[in-house]
Image: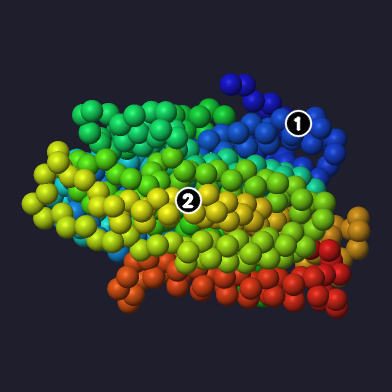
Amino acid sequence: MTTDVREIAPERTSGTRRPGRWIDHWEPEDPEFWARTGQRVARRNLAWSIFAEHLGFSVWLLWSVSAAMMASAGFDLTAQQLFWLLAVPNLVGSLLRVPYTFAVPRFGGRNWTIASAVLLLVPTLLFVVVVQRPGTPYWVLVLVAATAGLGGGNFASSMANINFFYPAERKGAALGLNAAGGNLGVAIIQLFLPVVVGGAGLFGLVKAAESGIHLERAGLLYAALAVVAAAGAWAGMDNLRSARSTVREQLSVVRYRHTWVMSFLYVGTFGSFIGYSAAMPLLIKLNFWNQPVPGVDGIGVNFAYFAFLGALVGSVARPFGGWLADRLGGARVTVGCFALMVAGTLGVLATLRSLEPVPAQPTDGVDPATFAYAPDVVAAVDHNTGLFGWFLLTFLVVFAAAGAGNGSTYRMIPAIWRSYADTGTEEGTPARAAARARSVKEASAVIGLAGAVGAIGGFLIPITFGSPWVSDPIEAVQTAFVVFTGFYVVCAVVAWAVYLRRGAPMARAGV
């Protein structure tokens, strides 16, 4: 691939050439530069960024589907243990987002995309090893699941990098597309992993393999794709010298109040998206599926047919949220999204409370070849299956609102920091130009920090669903939705009070 040497030149340090492609001159706010060169280069970097981030999300949620299939693979784990396997990768991924964000200005966006793609070999190859050994101690499974958090860190570095490439009026759409491409990794792995491992899927069009479940196939597939992503980033991406900054400069954003307000709101949007995405397969299996004896055909709703829909809807809604925020304002869209999330969670809760408890059926010493479901079990499962459509519909409303809210909140961050830059400086002055350049770096740091804090929601949601202090798993899930509804009300009030309320400084700035 050839590169325009007028835009890209190697950095020289002490007379030696530093490897990697570095762009010295980058002015996306200049219409002439953007039309001549910037748009083409930005789109190329965005394409490979989306692919690498997509794989990161897929690896991050590798355990979300696998956990629901581990019983078929020979593992004997409780519902609470499985929810922990979902939660731990989200916790690690949220913590890694801070150093991953700082890595872009330190090493370059292209260089770090290559490194982060190669790091995905760790969780994928370890996954291949442990899922073939049902006797693996649970603590080892938890440690291996934790390494999947490496995929969660990719989002922060990818978003921080792309933020530098695009002009202010295009950031909402660009960041929305970048994030949506990554978020789709959740839907793709939830849709195709059951097919890849031989567990059926695609709405029942693909049958289960006669040889049984082979979870290791998913790990091998994504390890190979990680190598492709690293090679693609090496060949097709660039580093921006204008994005260079020190860790101290990036950490300076912690002094801004809006850094923490936006991080809090992002817990409500992205934390919900990733937490619900991770938990949805188990939620469907827990509430709508019955298979008391391994080897017996289950009855009810098979999670493999529907679990991916939530992540798919949320991913598609994300760029729409960014696009809508570009036109209506991020704060208005964000408040509207939280209102929809309140309505959606109330709908989910109402559906779950209408379910009938499924009677326990003795299974000790039962021969799978002669097993038959009791009439009262069949009746309860049939009743619950009839309510699944309402559960899915209301849950998809939550996913759509959370996805759109992800896009609108990330549109708000550059707008807030641009407002900081314009305050006290005059249009066309060197001071305004310097302030805006600094605001882009700070906004990228905030995007990473808010992404880290927000991703903690992905840890808290599965843990709340599997609350060890609630003995009945069904009751724990219903209580969790009550808590989440209250939280979304608080988020909506905070967003309105800080960014929309008449007289609020950021309301006047049109954030």
Residue 271 location in percent, x, y?
53, 61
Q: Nearer the viewer, residue 57 or 340?
A: 340
Residue 35 makes an appearance in the image: yes
Q: Nearer the viewer, residue 227 or 466?
A: 466
Task: Classify residue 174 by image quadrant.
Answer: top right
- Amino acid on which the number 1 mark rests in the picture: Thr
Query: The C terminus lies in which quarter of the figure?
Result: bottom right
Q: Look at 57% across and 70% down and name the residue there.
A: 485
The secondary structure type at the circle numbered 1 is helix
Task: Classify residue 303 by image quadrant.
Answer: top left
Position of residue 454 relative to residue 215, above or below, is: below
Mark 1 / mark 2, whichever is N-terminal? 1
C-alpha gap between disc 1 and disc 2: 56 Å
Query: The N terminus lies in which quarter of the figure?
Result: top right
Residue 151 location in percent, x, y?
43, 48
Residue 30 location in percent, x, y?
83, 42
The residue where tag 1 is placed is 37
Q: Look at 53% across and 27% down and name the residue there.
A: 235
Q: Which mark is residue 386?
A: 2
Residue 457 location in percent, x, y?
49, 64
Which tag is nearer the camera, tag 1 or tag 2?
2
Q: Look at 75% across and 76% down and name the residue there.
A: 497
